Image (cartoon, rainbow, N blue to C red):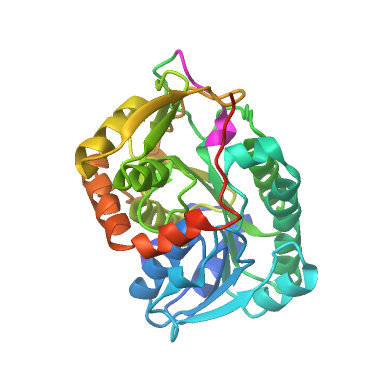
């Protein structure tokens, strides 16, 4: 923390002194609100900061939609003040934000296939919800606001070997990616607030809702079922373990420059065929099945995380080690994902 303060005081113009006071406010006895903190990445972040900052008061606001679970916060009952609610409700947001030193916004609808079928929930949470949270932060003089976004805002970079940079133009394709792009724009336009944005690559690991590709493949393989690979399986993603993602956001919360954007990616580009093969090999079951591609499927995402690395972030998990960890978790927690996959809210997507 001292290094941050020195950088701001002596290396920045006088107009940036407000950032100095904001960073001073995020100390070891701060109150931090994590929205979407009962979801996949959000809950990993809550576990991370609960361990890293024993003096913090941690609030979680989560609507507990189909992919939010109180069980994700198991073991943190004495550390977390939990509120069930919608970030797009002004009264709910204001009550959660009041008295906070920082807000980290994970709350989002995030499944591309669902956004193609019905984009309304994505606009409600990913756009309107961001505006409501920003208004609440403004009214209650919150210090730092971290908007958690996605590499999908860059659009498809297939046919090149380049990595997306934070300065690149946005070219979102899916309704999900468009909603996240708009949410970012709203956050970064709030010049009177100390806003930073992270753009994470495809994330996997324990507790991920099993509609997403890796937990879907792992759980299907455990049951000796089919692994449905879209198209010809050559779509490329940069897969990052959730613990690395959480650590990156934590670092940006503390040390990110006001108004800046930071890519978080593992520098490991892997296509769908290789993901499926690696899972079949580790689980010892399952059968790969090629299925019709989803509409307007982007074939490659890949980000350059140099800016975050310059702050001191490095990914710790290789894909293989992370996949081993993930498979082990789903084997040990079959009661959870079996119940999820049997619930009415679980969806199978068929674009044929």
Residue 270 point in image, percent of width and height: 33, 29
From this viewpoint, is residue 123 visible?
yes
Residue 193 point in image, percent of width and height: 67, 60
For this rendering, which residue is in front, 270 or 291? Answer: 291
Question: Given the current orientation, which residue lies at the most extreme right position?
Answer: 90
Q: Is residue 154 above or below residue 95?
A: above
Q: In the image, is 275 to the left or to the right of 202?
A: left
Q: In the image, is 106 to the left or to the right of 311?
A: right
Q: Quadrant of residue 208?
A: bottom left
Residue 327 point in image, percent of width and height: 27, 50
Task: Please provide the residue range marked out in magenta.
Answer: 152-159
Q: Quadrant of residue 275?
A: top left
From this viewpoint, is residue 308 visible?
no
The answer to whether residue 157 is magenta is yes
Report the quarter where the N terminus lies: bottom left
Principal secondary structure, stretch drawn in magenta: loop
């Amino acid at each position: 923390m001292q290094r941050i303060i020195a950088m701001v005081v002596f290396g920045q113009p006088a107009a940036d002194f407000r950032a100095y006071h904001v960073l001073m406010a995020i100390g070891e006895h701060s109150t931090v609100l994590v929205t979407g903190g009962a979801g996949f990445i959000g809950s990993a972040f809550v576990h991370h900061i609960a361990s890293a900052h024993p003096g913090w008061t941690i609030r979680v606001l989560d609507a507990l939609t189909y992919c939010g679970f109180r069980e994700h916060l198991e073991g943190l009952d004495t550390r977390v003040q939990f509120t069930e609610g919608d970030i797009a409700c002004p009264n709910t947001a204001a009550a959660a934000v009041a008295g906070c030193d920082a807000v980290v916004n994970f709350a989002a609808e995030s499944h591309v296939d669902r956004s193609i079928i019905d984009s309304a929930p994505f606009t409600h949470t990913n756009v309107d919800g961001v505006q409501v949270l920003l208004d609440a932060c403004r009214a209650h003089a919150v210090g730092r606001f971290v908007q958690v976004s996605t590499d999908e805002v860059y659009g498809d970079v297939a046919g090149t070997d380049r990595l997306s940079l934070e300065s690149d133009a946005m070219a979102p394709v899916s309704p999900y990616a468009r909603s996240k792009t708009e949410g970012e724009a709203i956050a970064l336009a709030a010049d009177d607030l100390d806003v930073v944005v992270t753009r994470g690559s495809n994330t996997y690991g324990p507790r991920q809702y099993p509609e997403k590709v890796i937990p879907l493949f792992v759980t299907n393989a455990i049951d000796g079922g089919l692994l449905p690979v879209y198209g010809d399986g050559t779509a490329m993603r940069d897969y990052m373990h959730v613990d690395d993602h959480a650590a990156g956001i934590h670092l940006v919360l503390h040390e990110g420059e006001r108004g800046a954007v930071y890519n978080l990616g593992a520098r490991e580009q892997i296509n769908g065929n290789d993901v499926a093969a690696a899972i079949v090999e580790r689980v010892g079951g399952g059968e790969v099945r090629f299925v019709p591609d989803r509409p307007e499927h982007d074939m490659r995402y890949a980000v350059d995380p140099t800016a975050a690395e310059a702050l001191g972030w490095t990914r710790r998990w290789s894909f293989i080690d992370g996949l081993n960890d993930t498979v082990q978790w789903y084997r040990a927690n079959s009661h959870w994902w079996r119940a999820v996959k049997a619930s009415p809210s679980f969806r199978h997507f068929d674009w044929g």
